[in-house]
Amino acid sequence: MRRPVAIVTGLVLFGEAVGIVLINAVLATIAENQNMSLAGLDPDAMSAGTWVMGGLSGLLLVLCGLIALLAGARDRAPARFGRIALIGCAVVHGVLGAVTVGLVGWGAFAFMMLVLALLVLTLLAYGPRAKDGLDDEAALAATPRQTPAGAAAGVRPTAP
């Protein structure tokens, strides 16, 4: 179940990246065409800032989508940087979801919460599994290896 969730998360983040870039492109074009300014700020600076914000947001969403997609394709947990990036993406979606409910509406809020849920499910599905206080690698190292005969490694069979 964790592979499909991670792959869907990656694909949804790719789609969201395209949407964010397009929205910022529209906003930058409107600010430039209307010659709008905020508190005397240069309209060209506002337009350039909107383009940069859209590009960076899209790039970060693509990065997080790639991390989730690779985790699903490999069926392995993302490394430390990947987990931190996905956690940061989840936090941003939670905060933006709270903002969008007032500014945009409940539909945008529902979408942001859907993406947040996918990110959290991906993080939990590939989270550490403790077994007697040990992580996966320590638990594997602590269990004795089996020889083809079925006896524990390092134990000599007794004579009948």
Image (cartoon, rainbow, N blue to C red):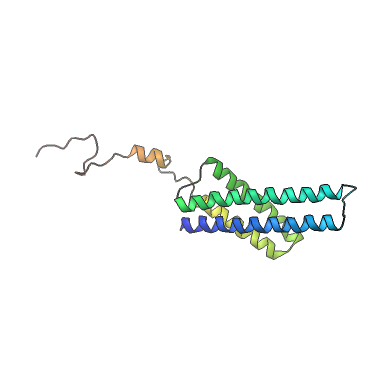
Q: Is residue 48 left or right of residue 73?
A: right
**Percent x, y of residue 121:** 53, 54
Picture mark count: 0
Q: Is residue 49 left or right of residue 147?
A: right
Name the outermost residue toward the bottom: 107
Q: Is residue 139 left or right of residue 39?
A: left
Name the outermost residue toward the right: 40
In the image, residue 107 sits, relative to residue 2, either above or below, namely: below
Residue 91 seen in this snapshot: no
* Residue in the foreground of this view, choosing between 100 and 67: 67
**Percent x, y of residue 15:** 61, 59
* Residue in the foreground of this view, choosing between 27 and 64: 27
Residue 67 seen in this snapshot: yes
In the image, residue 65 sits, relative to residue 139, either above or below, namely: below
Q: Is residue 76 left or right of residue 52?
A: left
Determine the residue positioned at 74% across, 51% down.
51
Determine the residue positioned at 78% across, 48% down.
48
Question: Residue 16, located in which quarter of the rendered image?
Answer: bottom right
**Percent x, y of residue 152:** 24, 39
* Residue in the foreground of this view, choosing between 66 and 152: 66
**Percent x, y of residue 66:** 55, 50
Name the outermost residue toward the left: 160
